[in-house]
Amino acid sequence: MMIKTYKVMLLPNNKQRTKLFECAGVARWAYNFALATQQENHKNGGKFLSDGELRKRLTELKKQKEYDWLNKYSNNITKQAIKDACQSYKNFFEGRTKFPKFKSKKRSRPSFYVDTAKIKITDTHVKLEKLTTSKKSNKQKLNYIKLAEKCRIPIGNNTKYSNPRVTFDGLNWWLSIGVEEVEAKNQNYTEGIGIDLGVKDLAVVSSGQKFKNINKLSKVKKLEKRLKRLQRKLSKKYELNKIQIEGGEFRYRKTNNIKKLEFLVLKTHRRLKNIRYNYIHQITTSLVKTKPEYVVMENLNTCGMLKNRKLSKAIQEQTFHEFKRQMGYKCAWNGIKFILADRFYPSSKTCSRCGAIKDKLSLSERTFICDECGYEIDRDLNASINLKNYGKSIA
């Protein structure tokens, strides 16, 4: 069995949108409450407080008039937020992450948890818990939020859901939920493939397929120009609304026009991101549908590659990590072996015919010419064939 995650956009009305923001605010408050209590307890020399202990303290707080408003929202929101805070606190002391920060209303992503026992999903709607406290049938409709995609999430009596979360990305609300499914096992595999990622072409496959760099298309270039224009306009607006305060410092006043421009900048950024991610989805899906025995890719040092000032923008736009991520989980869904070649494996410098390794190979050399056997081949295709052979030796 495997857990497959589905992410579907929600289409709430104005009342539902307000309630969703309120639920996210409750989750943020509970997380900060748990974190503050843990910190105060640690300063006083106390031991780590379990999430069960913190939930008991919150239950006592709810009995007070000052915190009576918490009873209007689902208990599962605060319960999971406290669990998340305790887990992040544990992760810090076990050396896995940095010290957890308090969630900010402006900077943190609004999100909250929905209990698996309370959530109900149909082909067109999802029912969330306690968006309204009224028991009238016409008011209960507020709990049902429309889904943007019909029949996307599997439903049925035997369907098991896990970790449902509702999040806001700055433009839309999304529901992400894990569904337990049976692992796919293919009987008839084709020959394994190697994939070489690059800047000139996004991906070159050992079979000879080439996938172009989508950032060179006129549609993407127009959007990038529009983004630059909006950013310049936004910068000028901020400069016009600059106020000098005491001590010679400046403060920027955010007007309604600035907020509108920021929203347009966010929409353009999201549009560019969606175009690139959709293109990668199309490529990875088409490759997985051929049912190769294995897929080999390089474990690229993207952070190191971004230090090259001349190529950093082009490398960033190619989103290599996203390509690798999508390829990884799609191979897992289809029972295909996914192999990451060693970072220092010389796939570009090795001759795919005789196996001789070149000492030097500059980026300007687009055709690989072997010094030993004189074999000439496209540089990226040569690298992808070497990656395929690497996977064959391991498999």
Image (cartoon, helix red, strand yellow):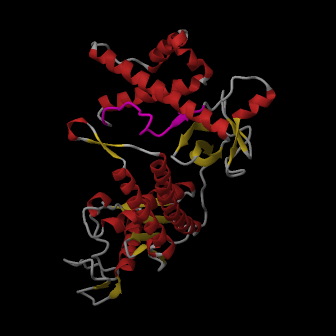
Can residue 254 be seen here? The reply is yes
Q: Quadrant of the C terminus?
A: bottom left
Q: Position of residue 99 (x, y in %)?
A: 31, 32
Residue lying at 62% horizontally and 48% vertically, measured from the top left: 8
Horizontal arrangement in the rendering, residue 337 relative to residue 156 (left or right): left
State the residue in front, 161 or 109.
Answer: 109
Q: Quadrant of the N terminus?
A: top right
Q: Position of residue 153 (x, y in %)?
A: 67, 47
For the record, the magenta segment spans 98-114
Q: Is residue 120 above or below residue 134?
A: below
Q: Is residue 280 above or below residue 121?
A: below
Residue lying at 39% horizontally and 69% vertically, measured from the top left: 197
Residue lying at 66% horizontally and 42% vertically, measured from the top left: 12
Whether 105 is among the magenta residues is yes
Q: Is residue 165 above or below residue 190?
A: above
State the residue in front, 377 or 106.
Answer: 106
Q: Position of residue 114 (x, y in %)?
A: 60, 32
Choose top left, top right, bottom left or bottom right for residue 185: bottom right
State the residue in front, 363 or 262.
Answer: 262
Q: Main secondary structure of the magenta part?
A: loop
Can residue 395 be seen here? The reply is no
Whether 115 is among the magenta residues is no
Horizontal arrangement in the rendering, residue 40 relative to residue 21 (left or right): left
Choose top left, top right, bottom left or bottom right for residue 290: bottom right
Q: Is residue 329 above or below residue 83?
A: below
Q: Residue furthest right?
A: 137
Choose top left, top right, bottom left or bottom right for residue 353: bottom left
Horizontal arrangement in the rendering, residue 364 relative to residue 7 (left or right): left
Q: Position of residue 21 (x, y in %)?
A: 56, 35
Q: Residue furthest bottom?
A: 374
